[in-house]
Image (spheres, helix red, strand yellow):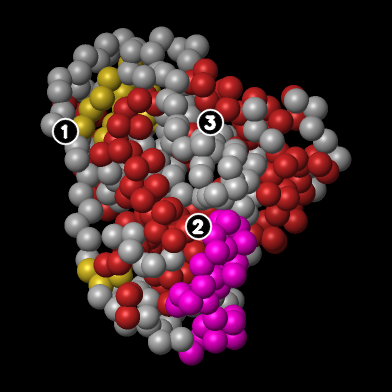
Amino acid sequence: MKKDGTNTKMHFPTEFDAILDRIANIDPVGYDKSRNYIDGAVSYLSPYISRGVISTKFVYQQLLKRNFHPNKILKFIQELAWRDYWQQVWIAKGDAINSDLKNIQTPVVAYGISKNLANARTGIEAVDKSIDELYNSGYVHNHLRMYIASIACNISHNHWKHPAKWMYYHLLDADWASNALSWQWVAGANSNKKYYANQENVNTYCYTEQTNTFLDIPYEDFEKLEIPDALLSTEILELKTPLTKSKQITINKDLPTLIYNFYNLDPLWKNELTANRVLLLEPSHFEEYPISQNTINFLIGLSKNIENIQIFVGEFNALKTSYNIDDIYYKEHPLNNHYQGNETERDWMFSVNGYYRSFFAFWKKCKKEIIF
């Protein structure tokens, strides 16, 4: 890749074979040293993990099959474990992750998002470019996500939740646990201190050479920094999911019915069964956690990997009662608590579960299961 911040892997194919090819070609060794750079050896697998097409366990096992020694790829394994950790927090805390989890974010002067941030006009070249990329491709490098969150929360002093929902809305890898808890981590609501990045840091990892911006200050000056004029004006964005009306589907009552959703599009799940396969898109879910048309298109594209899948737009109970379905299977997820039927477990990299106050307490347990 060119060292100009240009990302040549922004295209996210939806065909399962192409996803497997991407797994087969990731560089988990190079990831350790270069992951923070805009052109680093990141995997671009997060949209597929978030949509439940593949699991962290599946990726981990594929790396072991390629004969990578865990010591050589430990940082990559750790980053996969972060995704499982956020999910475990969500399972344990439920809706509590929608509020400041550990500490009250302070100071907060607004509960929207700076207009110039949402419009990619902060004046920070790398940040503005990454926001344009978010709108166009549905992806932002993780380091840039931290920069954006820091500007939104710690420099603009907006509460984390609305900007987090804005980013989630546009991300193909929209994962509310990872997104909300990471934003809280940056804002100090889920960590012991706030995260800041100055212009020198941005320039280093994004190959820019900007100076004289509101980020071009020493780190010790951030806590007393006044909100920059460019970020003063805020707005509440209207984030609505463009769901279509439901069409009639066909259910064979002699067969079990497998329920897929925004967080489970696994084409290998129970693929040995002859069954009704239904992608359930609940309006109530997408009203609480709205997503963009771009993400909808990605979702539908991924669902085509599941043979004979049908789409039902409506609530779970409406599906169950309208078609008189009894033999139902679904994967466990915090947003599926109202489902009824046979719940199956998701795949996890390790057997470690439950709530850990810090990732590193969780990771310490996970490492014990790695065979070095």
The residue labelled by disc 2 is 144
Q: Amino acid at mark 2?
A: Leu
**Which of the pair 58/113 is nearer the observer?**
113
**Which of the pair 307/71 is nearer the observer?**
71
Q: Amino acid at mark 1?
A: Thr
Q: Is residue 285 above or below residue 230?
A: above
Q: Is residue 171 magenta?
A: no
Q: Is residue 218 magenta?
A: yes
Q: Secondary structure at mark 3?
A: loop
Magenta span: 197-224
Q: Amino acid at mark 3?
A: Ile
Label annotation for residue 244 = 1
The residue labelled by disc 3 is 54
| Sooner in the amino-acid sequence: mark 3 or mark 2 | 3
Q: Answer whether residue 207 is visible to the viewer in this image.
A: yes
Q: Position of residue 59 (x, y in %)?
A: 63, 32
Q: Is residue 53 above or below residue 144?
A: above
